[in-house]
Image: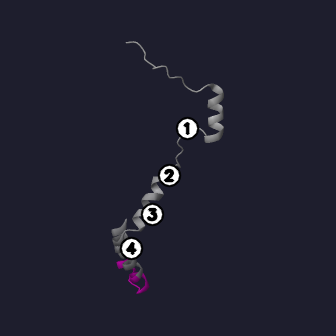
Amino acid sequence: MPARNFNITGLSKQEVIASRSKNGDNRLTFKKENGFFDAIKSLAKEPMIILLMAAAVIHLISGQAGDAIFWRQLLF
């Protein structure tokens, strides 16, 4: 199959260099994210986790350490 370029020419090397200096490279840059910390942050925002943590803290304050440990075990 013959190549058909329809008489279209690309940029010259000088035009490419000028375009890159004006517009930057044609590349996508991504921020590397840590999935573990994202998972911990999203878990900390869950209402049920907040409720269980509050229950464990209330039991610790009231002196019922056994119950507080039970609530903690439900979390983890």
Magenta-highlighted residues:
58-68
Please name the amino acid that badge 3 sits on: Lys
Please name the amino acid that badge 4 sits on: Ile
Is disc 1 placed on a helix, strand or loop? loop
Q: CA distance from mark 1 to mark 3?
A: 33 Å
Structural crowding at the residue carrying mark 1, measured as other residues with C-alpha within 10 Å and reported as few (<14), some (14–19) or many (≥20): few
Q: Is residue 71 above or below residue 31?
A: below
Give whichever of 45, 9 is nearer the camera. 9
Structural crowding at the residue carrying mark 3, measured as other residues with C-alpha within 10 Å and reported as few (<14), some (14–19) or many (≥20): few
Query: The C terminus is located in which quarter?
Result: bottom left
**Which disc is residue 33 wearing?**
2
- The mark nearer the N terminus, 2 or 4, is 2
Q: As drawn, which residue projects farthest toward the bottom?
A: 62
Q: As drawn, which residue projects farthest toward the front?
A: 7
Q: Is residue 9 above or below residue 55?
A: above
* Rendered residue at 61%/41% (across/down): 23
User: Which of the 4 quarters of the picture holds residue 64?
Assistant: bottom left
Q: In the rendered view, does 8 fall on the left or right side of 49?
A: right
Is disc 4 placed on a helix, strand or loop? helix
Label 4, on which residue? 50
Label 3, on which residue? 41
